[in-house]
Image (tube, rainbow, N blue to C red):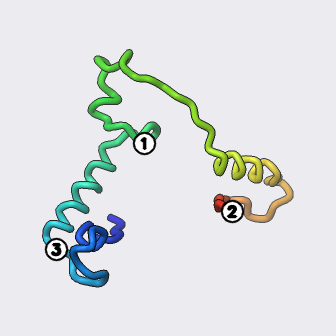
Amino acid sequence: MRLGVPLSVARGARLPGSAWTRRDWALAQAVEMLDRIKCPKCRQPTWLAHDKDTRNRWKVSATRCYACDAVASKEKGFNPDNTHNIEALYFGAEYLG
């Protein structure tokens, strides 16, 4: 489990660097559990997204992510035959403002 900032610190109730409270641990574990039960593709809860009774109850929309678009364009420019150790290349996007 990857831990970030405890909720009590994010809310300003405690100072950064303080020990995690029981409530912080319980909330972190709950978030981890909720993330594990999501569909890996659409990120909807599996109990809902994989239920046949919900088959016709979904509204789909398309949105272009311009950061992903820029990364995909850059990746296309690399030829695996001419690039040493292509598996070691990772692409990311940074917003320039």
- Mark 2 vs 1, N-terminal side: 1
Task: Name the residue rendered at 36%, 19% in the picture.
Answer: 57
Secondary structure of the residue carrying numbered label 3: loop
Q: Nearer the viewer, residue 48 or 8?
A: 8
- Mark 3 vs 2, N-terminal side: 3
Report crowding for label 2: few under 14, some 14 to 19, many 20 or more residues within 10 A (C-alpha): few
Q: Residue furthest bottom?
A: 17
Task: Name the residue rendered at 76%, 53% in the picture.
Answer: 74
Determine which residue is flagged by label 1. 40
Contact between marks 3 and 2 (CB within 8 A): the answer is no
Where is residue 30 drawn, in percent x and y? 22, 55
Kindly identify the amino acid type of the residue bearing the numbered disc 1: Pro
Give the distance between the C-alpha atoms of the residues marked 3 and 2, in whole angstroms: 38 Å
Q: Quadrant of residue 52?
A: top left
Q: Quadrant of residue 53?
A: top left
Determine which residue is flagged by label 3. 21
Secondary structure of the residue carrying numbered label 1: loop
Where is residue 5 drawn, in percent x and y? 33, 71
Picture quarter with the N terminus = bottom left
Q: Nearer the viewer, mark 3 or mark 2?
A: 2
Give the distance between the C-alpha atoms of the residues marked 3 and 1, in whole angstroms: 30 Å
Q: Quadrant of residue 25?
A: bottom left
Kindly identify the amino acid type of the residue bearing the numbered disc 2: Leu
The answer to whether residue 28 is above or below residue 41 is below
Kindly identify the amino acid type of the residue bearing the numbered disc 3: Thr
Where is residue 17 drawn, in percent x and y? 29, 84
Q: Is residue 40 left or right of residue 83?
A: left
Give the distance between the C-alpha atoms of the residues marked 2 and 1, in whole angstroms: 29 Å
The answer to whether residue 81 is above or below residue 60 is below
| Residue 96's disc number | 2
